[in-house]
Image (cartoon, rainbow, N blue to C red):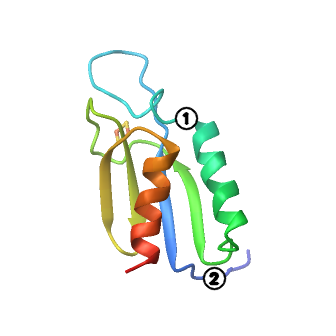
């Protein structure tokens, strides 16, 4: 076992959970794995690969019918109602600029 110590400035967890039943809303299919991949490529194109991590996540606990949910850590910011890659980029840019 080996420890890897690396601390990015920001870790973005994006829920792509999709429920089979319609009892509760889920982030997918509004937010897809392909959309997360697009965000990762965008982060790479900005040269932020070592400072911003982007990871697909399962349910983050803020399921809602208006869109997807993401969390930015360690800032502790949860955002719901995400409906596009543009929305995700906007949230990341807000954090980068603060
Ligand atoms: S399904 Fe995405 S936050 Fe619950």
- Residue 31 locus on image (x, y percent): 48, 36
Kindly tell me whether mark 1's CB lies below 8 Å from ligand 1: no
Relative horizontal placement of residue 83, taking residue 62 as reference (left or right): right
Alpha carbon separation for disc pair 2 and 1: 27 Å
Say which residue label 1 marks: 32
Horizontally, residue 44 falls left or right of residue 21, namely right
Choose mark 2 or mark 1, whichever is in front.
Answer: 1
Q: Nearer the viewer, residue 45 or 1?
A: 45
Q: Residue at x 26, y 35 (%)?
A: 64
First of labels 2, 1 by sequence position: 2
Asked whether residue 73 is in view, the answer is no
Disc 2 target residue: 6
**Kind of element beneath mark 1:** loop
How many numbered marks, from 0 up?
2
Give the SS element for disc 2: loop
Quadrant assignment, res 35? top right
Image point 39% across, 42% down: which residue? 59
Residue 20 falls in image quadrant: top left
> Where is residue 63 shown, x and y percent of the image?
29, 38
**Residue 30: x %, y % from top left:** 44, 30
Q: Is residue 72 visible?
A: yes
State the image coordinates of residue 87 (x, y, percent, origin top left).
43, 49
In this orientation, which residue lies closer to the viewer: 47 or 7? 47
When the figure is inspected, residue 95 is found, relative to residue 16, above or below; the finding is below
Residue shown at 58%/71% (left/top)?
52
The quadrant in which the C terminus is found is bottom left
């Amino acid at each position: 076992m080996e420890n890897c110590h690396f601390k990015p400035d920001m870790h973005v967890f994006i829920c792509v959970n999709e429920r089979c039943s319609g009892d509760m809303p889920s982030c997918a299919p509004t937010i897809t794995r392909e959309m997360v991949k697009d965000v990762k490529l965008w982060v790479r194109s900005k040269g932020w690969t070592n400072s911003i991590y982007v990871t697909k996540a399962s349910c983050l606990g803020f399921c809602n019918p208006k869109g997807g949910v993401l969390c930015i850590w360690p800032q502790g910011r949860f955002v719901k109602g995400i409906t596009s890659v543009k929305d995700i980029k906007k949230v990341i840019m807000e954090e980068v600029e603060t």
